[in-house]
Amino acid sequence: MRRLLLAVSLSAGLATAAVAQSGDIEANIAAQIEAFKADDFATAFTFASPNIQTMFRTPENFGAMVRNGYPMVWRPAEIRFLELRQISGFWWQKVMVVDANGRVHILDYQMVHLENGWKINGVQLLGNSDPSA
């Protein structure tokens, strides 16, 4: 019985930590998208990991990449957070984005936790789906 109670307690603790983590990750992604919507690429750049910042070097370069490569993130009509999962030591947050034309895009955000919080370490476009699904 003690083992069962310990297992239940540990599971509840892990679930609580995962929910808190999910909230922090979602807040990070949502804040970056809000910065994109305001064309505030300097702020949006702060939500990117050091690897991404090194790759693009400036907020202007980063903003150009997003405008040209991920217009659905730059000007979304709607976003919805889907599942958060851990794969090979990395956390991946799946996000559904509806663009201004009503098309649905599924993106996967790779997240890394650093001393100053969660950062976006990359985004993959997984594909489109039917919005009624």
Image (cartoon, rainbow, N blue to C red):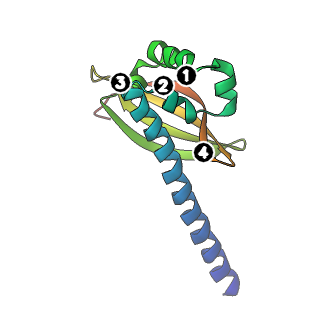
The kind of residue on which mark 2 rests is Phe
Q: Residue at x 63, y 82 (%)?
A: 5
Quick one: 125 or 48, which is closer to the camera? Answer: 48
Q: For mark 3, what is the residue?
A: 75
Q: For mark 4, what is the residue?
A: 118
Disc 4 element: strand
Quick one: 23 or 44, which is closer to the camera? Answer: 44
Q: Residues within 10 Å of mark 3 (few under 14, many from 20)?
A: many
Mark positioned earlier in the residue sequence (4 or 3): 3
Disc 2 element: helix
Mark positioned earlier in the residue sequence (1 or 4): 1
Mark positioned earlier in the residue sequence (2 or 3): 2
Residue 97, quarter of the rendered image: top left
Q: Residue at x 68, y 32 (%)?
A: 50
Q: Report x, y in % for residue 31.
A: 44, 39
Q: Residue furthest bottom?
A: 1
Q: Which mark is residue 41?
A: 2
Q: For mark 1, what is the residue?
A: 59
Q: Report x, y in % for residue 95.
A: 45, 36
Quick one: 122 or 8, which is closer to the camera? Answer: 122
The kind of residue on which mark 3 rests is Arg
Disc 3 element: loop
The kind of residue on which mark 4 rests is Trp
